[in-house]
Amino acid sequence: MGLVTDTPKKATNTKVEVENFLGARRNVVEAITHDFLEEGCSARAVAAAASPAFGRDQVIEYLAAVALRQSAAKAIAEAGLASVADTGVSGIEAPREALVALSGNAEETADFAALPQRLRQALKEFAITVTVRAGEHDDITDDLVDSLLLDGEQVRLVKVEPRS
């Protein structure tokens, strides 16, 4: 009598369902973004519609980042920097940040070292500034942020609050 060995089975059903779940989740996030940007639905209405899948505050914070990214993209385009600056959102999971990165390089971009200042000026007109991503550095200076931008790193976009 020979030994019978059990060959472990692969969890193919689980893998397929996880892929389906992640795809459906991605579709919900895309629908949230579409309803807000393209359909003009309020963040509250979108959050209410998405409440079975995501928390209200989570959706509202995500949409605030989406709106900030849109404003920054407009500022960048109006300043003629769209070919050297890319904006994005970190996603619906925390930290839900609007981000910007410079994508030009020193050899191909005239006055490359001045890009962070030009970016800051363009964003300033839309009451937006840049800073490092949450929790990355202790001593945050403009020079640090500029250095990160020139290295092609993503930095946070932050809405500037008016003085009262």
Image: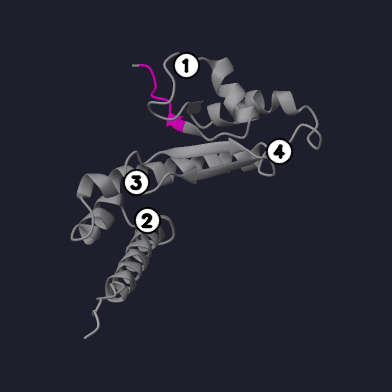
Image quarter for residue 138? top left
Kindly give the residue lying farthest to the bottom in the view shown: 1
Say what secondary structure mark 1 lies in: loop
Mark 1, residues whose alpha carbon is within 10 Å: few (<14), some, or many (≥20)?
few
Which residue is at the front of the view, 4 or 18?
A: 4
Determine the secondary structure under disc 4.
loop
Tell me how far mark 3 sits from mark 1, CA to CA: 24 Å
Of pointers 2 and 1, the one earlier in the residue sequence? 2
Residue under label 2: 36
Looking at the rendered image, the disc whose residue lies closer to the viewer, 4 or 3, is 4
Q: Is residue 161 found inside the magenta-colored segment of the image?
A: yes
Residue at the disc numbered 1 = 140
Q: Is residue 157 above or below residue 42?
A: above
Residue 148 among those drawn in magenta: no
Kind of residue sitting beneath label 2:
Phe
Is residue 162 something one can see in this rendering?
Answer: yes
Considering only order in the chain, which callout, 3 or 2, is on the residue closer to the N terminus? 2
Q: CA distance from mark 4 to mark 2?
A: 31 Å
Image check: 102 left or right of 51? Answer: right
Mark sitting earlier along the chain (4/2)? 2
Q: Which residue appears at 42% of the width and 44% of the height?
A: 90
Instruction: Say which mark, if any, is on residue 126.
Output: none
Q: Tell me what residue is drawn at x 32 percent, y 70 percent.
A: 15
Q: Residue furthest front?
A: 1
Where does the image place residue 38, in percent across and percent down from the top left?
A: 44, 60
Answer above or below: position of 16 versus 164: below
Q: Mark 4 = which residue?
A: 104
Which range is magenta?
Answer: 157-163
